[in-house]
Amino acid sequence: MATWYRVRNVNEVVCATDTVEVEPNNGTDFTHEELQGYIGGYIEVVYLNNDRMMIVYEEGKLKGLPFNVAATLAYNEGTGRYDDLILGNAIVCNRNQVK
């Protein structure tokens, strides 16, 4: 099971984050295309502790995507670092779920 941190526009100024549990279509591992669909574009992998990884939109900052509060908190907790912000959608999953 993986967690999808999805950003929704509430209005022109406010965005909200949903967390949705998702599984790969084949039940074991996500394809590159599946991940791009969840993220909305080119993917970047951020390695977290405990054999977990976060998949984010590679160009999220360049495109000025909305701040994802929940994904940023997951990044902070998963890395023990507080030096970055996650913008746009993200997925956190086990490393063995991406091949």
Image (tube, grey):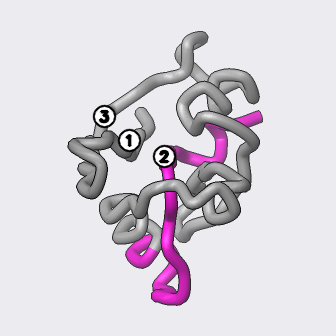
Magenta residue span: 76-99
Q: Are marks 1 and 3 in contact (CB under 8 Å)?
A: yes
Mark 1 → mark 3, Cα distance in angstroms: 8 Å
Q: Which residue is mark 1?
A: 6
Q: Which SS class for mark 2?
A: loop
State yes or no: residue 82 in magenta: yes
Near-viewer residue (33 or 12): 12
Q: Which residue is mark 2?
A: 89
Q: Which residue is mark 3?
A: 20
Can you give x and y, in whole percent of width and height, for residue 25 in the image?
Answer: 56, 12
Q: Which SS class for mark 3?
A: strand
User: Is 35 on the left-hand or right-hand side of 18?
Assistant: right
Mark 1 or mark 3, which has the lower sequence index? 1
Picture layout, residue 17 above or below residue 1: below
Can you give x and y, in whole percent of width and height, for residue 75 in the image?
Answer: 47, 69
Q: Are marks 2 and 1 in contact (CB under 8 Å)?
A: yes
Q: Which SS class for mark 1?
A: strand
Mark 2 → mark 1, Cα distance in angstroms: 5 Å
